[in-house]
Amino acid sequence: MEKIIILCAVFSAAIFLLVFIWKHQNMNDNRKRVHKHNHKIGHKHGEGYSIDFYAYASKIRHWNAEFKVYLSVLTLVLCIVFNNPYVSATVIIAMAYLTVIKGKIPAAEYLSILAIPITFILLSTFTIAIDFSKQAIGQCNLYLGFGYVFTSTVQLKKMVFLILKIFAAISALQMMTLSTPTSEIIYVLRKAHVPKLIVELMSLIYRYIFILMDVFTKMKNSAKSRQGYCDFKTSCYTFGSIASNMLIISLRKANAYYDAMESRCYDGDLVFLEEDKNVEVMQIVLAVVFIMFLVLIWYFTR
């Protein structure tokens, strides 16, 4: 029980740190607006956004792509293998520091990006904390007439530990995606000898997702401007119309996408501009120290 209290304290401290950074950045933004107009990272004009926007705006984009990808993947593997809540909490704090402090990504945008996976995590792990029985068992139970809904300290502990592990793994991947453009990640995968078909399909599918998102957003805004969501019946009709038109427009966009590739001398290989970035010795040293620190945490708290 003491370990759970300590873990909750560490996690609360991390949340407090993110909120403090968020408020501090908002205060600085407000001061800058007094003197001049500036564009905030992640501003939207009603047409969605791409994760690559944050990757190109990140202040650690100039770091070596292989270093960031390998560090992220290694951290992810350690979170899963160690299965230790203290390791997970440390990874969450460290990845938030790299993304928000070093990368200068606004804390509000970082939390909004993590909001979607956090929602799925909470919904999927909620079933671990509760269970049903015909008898009153566990520390907490609720009688529903046909049986009892109960939970216990063991189940709650298992749920909290699982949430931390999943959240740490997602944070490690988010550090990579929010600081490394997709083209550089593909370049790293090619150097790792991942099959060319998988790499090119990944690139095309990733790009096409945002094309369809942009088309859907424009169609939705157009329907809103024409009172297409004024009531439930109209909303259902509008949703069906947009869904049916998405297939036709997606085929048209696919043809235009291929024509654009053909006009740029596409011969079966996707070629990106590859920029060589050196890895600093201090970055390698700090990464090794961080990995060793995770190993030590796991060793003393297992």
Image (spheres, rainbow, N blue to C red):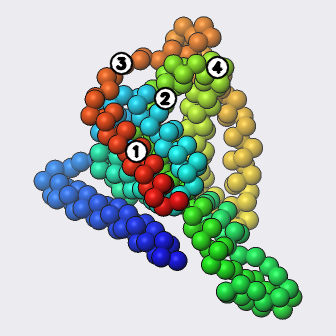
Residue 174 seen from this side: no
Give the label on residue 292, or none. 1
Q: Give, as a three-letter code, the residue at label 1.
A: Met
The answer to whether marks 3 and 4 mark residues whose Cβ atoms lie closer than 8 Å is: no
User: Distance of mark 2 from mark 3, alpha carbons?
Assistant: 13 Å
Label 1: few (<14), some (14–19) or many (≥20) C-alpha neighbours in 10 Å? few
Examine the rendered structure and indicate whether residue 5 appears above or below residue 197: below
Name the residue that disc number 2 marks.
185
Residue projecting furthest to the front: 300
The answer to whether marks 1 and 3 mark residues whose Cβ atoms lie closer than 8 Å is: no
The residue depicted at 33 percent of the width and 22 percent of the height is 277
Name the residue that disc number 4 marks.
195
Task: Classify residue 273 by image quadrant.
Answer: top left
Q: Nearer the viewer, mark 4 or mark 1?
A: 1
Left or right of 24? Residue 268 is: right
User: Distance of mark 4 from mark 2, alpha carbons?
Assistant: 14 Å
Residue 261 vs residue 106, the one in the foreground: 106
